Image (cartoon, grey):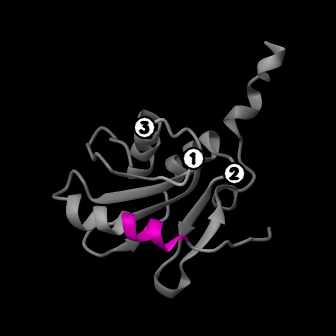
Amino acid sequence: MTTQTHLVDHELVEAAAHVARTRCRGDNHTMAAAARAGDGRIITAVNAYHFTGGPCAELVVIGTAAAQGAYELDTIVAVGDRERGVVAPCGRCRQVLLDYFPALRVIVGEGERIRTVHISELLPETYVWADHQLEADQR
């Protein structure tokens, strides 16, 4: 597998870090995410931890973006509270992000090794949920 990296959207990382510093309080909100919409807007959100499996910040960002009329996301990043820095998406988020946005870029890595990769690089040889759906003109 060949990994292709892209320029890191540092503005996006800083937006998520700012939300993590200023909005993440206590055990219920420990991660922030920021995504760049297709029109250039930055959408931010925090996780909603719950012992029943509350949504990660990346998933909350998807809903927040849709609520704001942004249905295409180009790049996403998650940042932990307490200055933990960039945190790669969990397995569930990787699958959902791939299903919703197959061309999405994800910022991953730590410190000087921060980089941007395609979501498919984080979940290689996976089942793509949208592949089973008929094209709109075939319905």
Residue name at image x 50 percent, y 49 percent: 93
Write the residue at 42% across / 37% down: 68
Q: Mark 2 or mark 1: which comes first in sequence?
A: 1
Sort mark 2 into few (<14), some (14-19) or many (20+) by Cα contacts within 10 Å. some
Label 2 element class: loop
Total labels drawn = 3
Work out whether 11 lies above or below 39. below
The part of the chain drawn in magenta is 9-15
Image location (x, y in percent) of residue 136: 77, 20
Spot occupied by residue 41 in the image (x, y as percentages of width and height)? 48, 52
Per the image, the residue denoted by label 2 is: 103
Residue 97 appears in the figure: yes
Seen at 57% across and 47% down, the residue is: 97
Residue type, mark 2 in image: Ala
Crowding at label 1, few (<14), some or many (≥20) Cα neighbours within 10 Å? many
Sequence-wise first label, 3 or 2: 3
Q: Main secondary structure of the magenta part?
A: helix
Q: Residue at x 21, y 50 (%)?
A: 28
Q: Is residue 3 above or below residue 31?
A: below
According to the picture, the residue beneath numbered tag 1 turns out to be: 97
The quarter of the picture where the C terminus appears is: top right
Residue 32 lies, with reference to residue 115, above or below; the image says: above
Q: Based on the picture, tell me whether residue 13 belongs to the magenta stretch.
A: yes
On residue 68, the disc is 3
Q: Which quarter shows the N terminus?
A: bottom right
Rendered image quadrant of residue 100: top right
Is the Cβ of the residue at disc 2 closer than 8 Å to that at disc 1?
A: no
Give the spatial CA distance, label 3 vs label 2: 20 Å
Front residue of 24/50: it is 24
